Amino acid sequence: MPRHQPGSSLRAARELYLEVTKDPSARPLVVASWQRSMEHRVKSGSLDAPYLDNPNLESPLARAALPILDRLHEQLADDPVSMMITDRNGVVLSRKVSHEGLTTNLNRVRLAPGHVFAERYVGTNGIGTALASGRPVMIAGIEHYVEALRDFHCAAVPILHPTRRTLLGAFNLTTIRQGSDGMLMAFARSVAAQIEGEIAAITSRRERALFHDYMEACSSVRPGPVLALNRDVVMMNEQLSTAVTGPDHYALLDHAREIADSPRTQGTRSLALPSGRVAELRVRRCRREDSDAGAVFRVRLIGRPQPGPAVSAAPARSGLGLVGSSPHWLRAVADSQAAFVAGTALHLLGEAGVGKRTLVETLHRAHGAGRRLEMTQPPLSDSPAVTEGWLHDIGELLAVPSNVLVLCEVHLLGDQLRQRLRNLLTHLDGTATGQLVLTSQPSMVSTDDQLDQLCGALVEVPPLRHRPGDIEDLARFFLRKYRPSAESRFSSDALTMLQRCPWPENVRQLEAVMRGLARRPCGPMIHAEDLPPECRVSSHKVLTTIEALERDAILRGLMDHNSNVQRTAQALGISRATMYRKMRRYGIVPSTLT
């Protein structure tokens, strides 16, 4: 998130930025990175690299890279150079360094496992700039945005998935030795290539294992509908592809992907489909050589599709006036309402932008007469004084009977502070009379459920991609909110495009799209060409600002050249192969452009 800073610090950064841009040797990549750093309002005078407990070392990237780093570490013993692997968010997963002096310097600037070195937090640096630009970078000395990093020379290379070419993370070399930039970059490129090669080998073994289990399931006496998938492959037999179509198809795949991404999930799960049917999924994990290769699902469909509700001028709403009529959403609202009315401690779990805060505020307006709603975020600092004050404030607020306290984004709490919060709430359990509500996002960083044990109700708020039937009602609601004087309708092609969009930022993103649409002159009928470029993709990837600009430029070029890829690539100054790679990366398909 953006970090606010004193005006003097920002002025100093701008002055140095002007010096960098005036330097004839300044590289455009570094200049662009400094500009992004200022837009993020990074403090140039101090270092603020967030820390995450328990970084995920079970990802394909980590499993492929760590043995390679171990071997190289033995060869570089006592050399003043460190090797690091990070995920695509800039979280340092592993660091290898045996030089005592360099270790001390790296620890001083928190360049260590668990810390996040994305540009939005620490400005221009090897890791963050390689991830933001998608290119190998060498950031040396004064090119670093934050002063504390200017003693270092860093060579970082993005690591891409071998088949999808999506960004997985980065390999980084850091030293304080000058004059070795060329050697560092050559070495970094070589190691990154080795890691990508190992990921390709692991992916191939996983795909073969999953295919074996899928064929075994399909060759049984009465196989029924069968689905098999992991992060790279989706396989389904003809019985499933003909039985589940339209919104049911997308909902089933989305839920199956989430189950497959959780190696611990198996057994039987039930899923309510948008059509009103229920899909019963029998999950079997595919494991080979102590590695999870995905999951195979036997699917049983229960019930018949129900006719959709008649289209009306007013959006469908729950009893609380919230827009939406999908079974997932109504169940989440009803369960939350029951817990709130009963005074039970409630935990709302859901992705960013799904409406957790809106749900709490609506419940308070409907059932919180005479009660004060208080919201607090995890402390930004882990200093003892700040954390002690935060915990003290929570205890004071919960001691007031008329308070409803909402602890937002508790997934950001580290293990130690999470345990201290649990101890506090356990101690207050017999005396506190204020009502507690927790909100959090699904997180791979912390998987303990200690806080959940203190809550009487855990409610999962569904992402927008699991509510395709609600998208039209929500879109019309937001249009009416920002353009109350006009009544607009969506053409069938526009509505289809909205329902196929993955909405990685959920309802918050849909509202932003409709707000922008309301500010532009549109007729009473909104067509697909009226929608912004971000609605024309099918990728679930959350894009950086630079990636979003690049994606939109490609979309505009394709539309200007009647979807001709070669002419668009020439106009953008890139090769046709690069054009196709970027289209795959951003989920751009020709059918979304017509």
Image: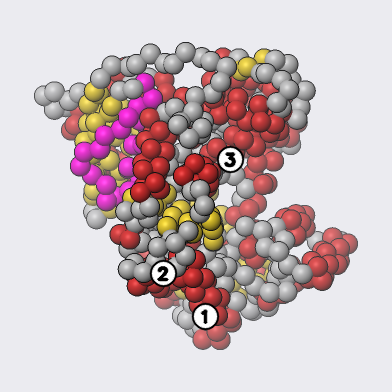
- Say few, some or many: other residues with alpha carbon within 10 Å of mark 1 (under 14 / 14 to 19 / 20 or more): few
Residue indicated by mark 2: 421
From the viewer's perspective, tell me whether residue 536 is left or right of residue 368. right
Q: Earlier in the sequence, mark 2 or mark 1?
A: 1
Up the image or down, 230 lies above or below 404; here it is above
Query: Which is more foreground, mark 2 or mark 1?
Result: 2
Where does the image place residue 550, in percent across and percent down from the top left? Answer: 68, 40
> What is the C-alpha distance between the residues marked 1 and 3?
34 Å
Residue indicated by mark 3: 508
Where does the image place residue 352, in percent across and percent down from the top left? Answer: 52, 47
**Nearest to the observer: residue 581 or residue 39:** 39
Residue indicated by mark 1: 384
Mark 1 residue element: helix
Looking at the rendered structure, the kind of residue marked 2 is Leu
Residue situated furthest right in the rendering: 22
Please provide the residue range marked out in magenta.
Answer: 251-275
Query: Which is more foreground, mark 3 or mark 2?
Result: 2
Where does the image place residue 445, in percent across and percent down from the top left? Answer: 42, 60
Asked if marks 3 and 2 touch (Cβ < 8 Å), the reply is: no
